[in-house]
Amino acid sequence: MGPKVNQKALAAKEKKAANQAAKDAEAARKADQAAAEEWKKGSNSRAASKAADAASKADEAARKRREKEALLAAEEEAMGSGKAVKSAFGAASKKKGGKKKDSLSLLEEALVGDAEKKAKEKKRAERIKKER
């Protein structure tokens, strides 16, 4: 016969071993779950960093645009009321007959008038040729 074994001590060791095995299984399950979470989080880190870079660039561009608009508004405010300045040149000024005409404007009108008359005469002559 072999050495005597205390039945209570043997039962306690078996119970202790079963509890330890349960604890080890739970710890392994939690470790696997944590590893899976890490893989999910880090699996697309390159795309996440690209998205973050794109967002920061867009924010920077928007900030610069806002600053530029603010500077332009401040500059316009400093320059004056921003009303359109009336020009002495252009179609509106030619319609007014009350303005004095200098020699340059008279010469220009004469040349333009002569050119227009010649163009009309040429078109009329071509029209007459086509009709014949």
Image (tube, rainbow, N blue to C red):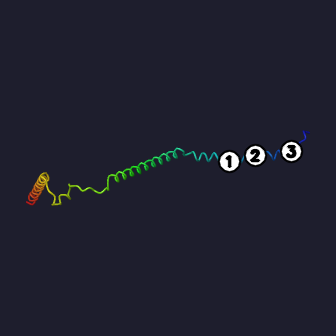
Crowd tier of the residue under label 2, counting other residues whose Cα lies within 10 Å: few below 14, some 14–19, many 20 or above? few
Q: Residue at x 75, y 46 (%)?
A: 21
| Mark 1, secondary structure of its residue | helix
> Residue 22, position in %: x, y?
75, 48
Identify residue type, mark 3. Answer: Ala
Q: Nearer the viewer, mark 2 or mark 1?
A: 1
Instruction: Give whichever of discs 2 and 3 has the lower sequence position.
Output: 3
Residues at circles 3 and 1 in contact by the CB criterion of under 8 Å: no
The image quarter containing residue 125 is bottom left
Residues at circles 2 and 3 in contact by the CB criterion of under 8 Å: no
The numbered dot on residue 21 is 2
Q: Residue at x 58, y 47 (%)?
A: 41
Q: Residue furthest right?
A: 1
Identify residue type, mark 1. Answer: Lys
**Circle 1 residue:** 30
Is 87 on the left-hand or right-hand side of 61?
A: left
Q: Residue at x 19, y 58 (%)?
A: 93
> Residue 44, position in %: x, y?
54, 46
Crowd tier of the residue under label 1, counting other residues whose Cα lies within 10 Å: few below 14, some 14–19, many 20 or above? few
131 to 44, vertically: above or below: below
Instruction: Give whichever of discs 3 and 1 has the lower sequence position.
Output: 3
Q: Nearer the viewer, residue 31 or 117?
A: 117
- Residue at mark 3 to residue at mark 1: CA–CA distance: 31 Å
- Residue at mark 2 to residue at mark 1: CA–CA distance: 14 Å
Identify residue type, mark 2. Answer: Ala
The numbered dot on residue 9 is 3
